[in-house]
Amino acid sequence: MNDESSPEAVGSEKQCHYDSMQKSELEPLAVSAIVEHRRLLQADQAVYEEWVRASEDPSISSSVLQTLQNEYLERQKRSEAQQEELSAMLDALGFVPDMPFDNGD
């Protein structure tokens, strides 16, 4: 039984979509997705560090800790989905594009 809303089916559908695109169209999308993925990872790391810091502070309430934990776990789910999307793009593209220099600004 193949559920068309399963992650495998959705991923396959996205892969087909990207496979039908010209590499000249797909490459800038992949660059943007990589930049966005890096930005999300940095934001996720900041939330994780705040959660760890709060966990070590006895004055922080358990409800605040739970909120931080929940936010971090939700971010991880979104990051996983975004990573799968990026992977489908790169698979269709066939290579990792050159990235613009990022000086951290």
Image (cartoon, rainbow, N blue to C red):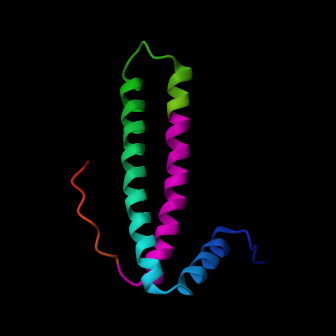
* Residue lying farthest to the right in this orientation: 1
Residue in the picture at 56% in, 36% down: 70
Vertical position of residue 98 compared to residue 38: above or below: below
What is the quadrant of the N terminus in the image? bottom right
Residue 101 position within the rendered picture, expressed as x and y whole percent measured from the top left = 23, 63
Query: Quick check: is 29 in the magenta stretch?
Result: no
Q: Give, as a single range, the part of the protein colored magenta.
A: 69-95
Residue in the picture at 50% in, 49% down: 76
Residue in the picture at 73% in, 69% down: 5
Residue 18 position within the rendered picture, expressed as x and y whole percent measured from the top left = 54, 80
Which one is in front, 58 or 46?
Answer: 46
Residue 12 position within the rendered picture, expressed as x and y whole percent measured from the top left = 61, 78
Vertical position of residue 75 compared to residue 32: above or below: above
Vertical position of residue 63 compared to residue 19: above or below: above
Q: How many marks?
A: 0
Main secondary structure found in the magenta portion: helix
Vertical position of residue 78 compared to residue 61: above or below: below
47 sits to left or right of 99: right
83 sits to left or right of 57: right
* Residue lying farthest to the top in this orientation: 59
Residue in the picture at 41% in, 77% down: 27
Which one is in front, 50 or 31?
Answer: 31
Residue 52 position within the rendered picture, expressed as x and y whole percent measured from the top left = 38, 31
**Which image quadrant for residue 36?**
bottom left
**Which image quadrant for residue 35?**
bottom left
8 sits to left or right of 49: right
23 sits to left or right of 18: left
Query: Quick check: is 77 in the magenta stretch?
Result: yes
